[in-house]
Amino acid sequence: MSHHHIATHRRAELPPPLTTGATTNPDLTITLGLDDHGHLTAAPDQPSPAADHALVLLGFTRPRGQRLHLLDVSPGQRSDVATTCARLLTEAGYEVAAMPALVPDPDRPPDQTPGPEPLRGDPTVVITRHPVLGITATTADPGHGDTHRLITRSGFHYLPSHSLYVLPFDIPHDQALAAATELADYLGAHHVPATVSPAIHHPLPGQRLTSQAPEAAAPRRRQNHRWTTRVAQLLRAAANRLVPEPSNPPTPPALSEGTAWVQVPLRGHAPRWTPPAALPPAPGMLLRTHAARTFTSLCSAPGPAAPTVHHDGHGTSPARRKR
């Protein structure tokens, strides 16, 4: 009775794949974006102390109790900073996702249509006194953008019905003047052109007067415009009763019509963001690289012939088969 030898070939043993874990997870993604205040944001999709440290090296800060990491950069630097951050994070082993407005797709052909020359800085900010609303600030593009972020930081609130920014109605007169001065200094420090009425901000050494005030943004006309104006008048009257005007307010110096507005000078150099040369490798990146190289070498290197397995389970080497 002949025994039929059934031969099967065992596959070469390969190292098991790396398990997905907190320290070797290759799927951690950091998303770059913008928040409502114009900050560059970075959000890892899962907790990672190493990713947090990498973002700190890039200049990001994370407010207490928040998930987003924030980086405050000027509008003209946003795209370059986001592109550099994406490159450094990718080289360190992280997956990076970003909105196209921040990091353009390198595979997408550039738009050949010539566009308008990019604006240098934000639209001019005008700080003046409204007969009902008090000290106000206006811009050519109110309600959003970087100018909106800078103005609201100084304590002003956006009033959509009038397309301007106002201070709280119950603020004392001296605090309102201080807020206007603080806003002017803040805009100058951030290289945003601004003009201020001398009734609010008198010219100081280093500041100059301009002969023509810029046009304020025209208020938006809506159906409830009269009702909103009436409410503003009532609130202003209540504020005047609660906080009366000073008995002897300072008299502003007499200025001619040709010298009616103060131009706020831009102070210092525009802040620049300096990236690090490189970031530490992501956790598990070196281990994954070593495992990938080992797997490639095992697949490409010629190995010994696989033994033949008979029905009885014993293997036979090529040398034994010759005998």
Image: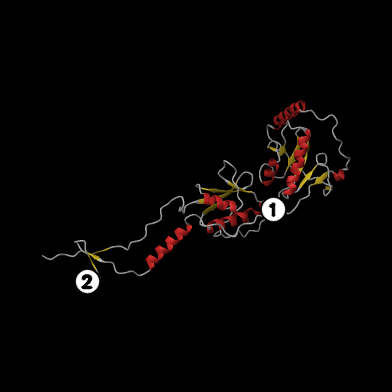
Q: Height in image: 85 above or below 254?
A: below
**At numbered mark 1, what does the secondary structure look like: helix, strand or loop?**
loop
Residue at (37% x, 59% y) in the render: 15
Q: Quadrant of the C terminus?
A: bottom left
Residue at (86% x, 31% y) in the render: 248
User: For this view, does 124 lie left or right of residue 113?
Assistant: right
Cα gap from disc 2 to disc 1, whole angstroms: 78 Å
Amino acid at the residue labelled 1:
Pro
Q: Which of 138 and 63 is in front in this view?
A: 63
Q: Position of residue 165 (x, y in %)?
A: 71, 38
Q: Height in image: 280 above or below 196?
A: below
User: For this view, does 230 lie left or right of residue 320?
Assistant: right
Q: In which quarter of the image is residue 223?
A: top right
Q: On the image, numbered disc 2 is attached to which residue?
A: 320
Whether residue 192 appears in this view of the structure is no
Whether residue 187 appears in this view of the structure is yes
Q: Where is residue 13 in the image (x, y as percent from the top left)?
A: 33, 61
Q: Name the residue furthest left.
A: 1
Q: Where is residue 215 in the image (x, y as percent from the top left)?
A: 77, 44
Q: On the image, numbered disc 1 is attached to which residue?
A: 271
* Nearer the camera: disc 2 or disc 1: 2
Q: In which quarter of the image is residue 131?
A: top right
For label 1, the crowd category at 10 Å Cα-Cα, with few meaning under 14, some 14 to 19 and many 20 or more, is few
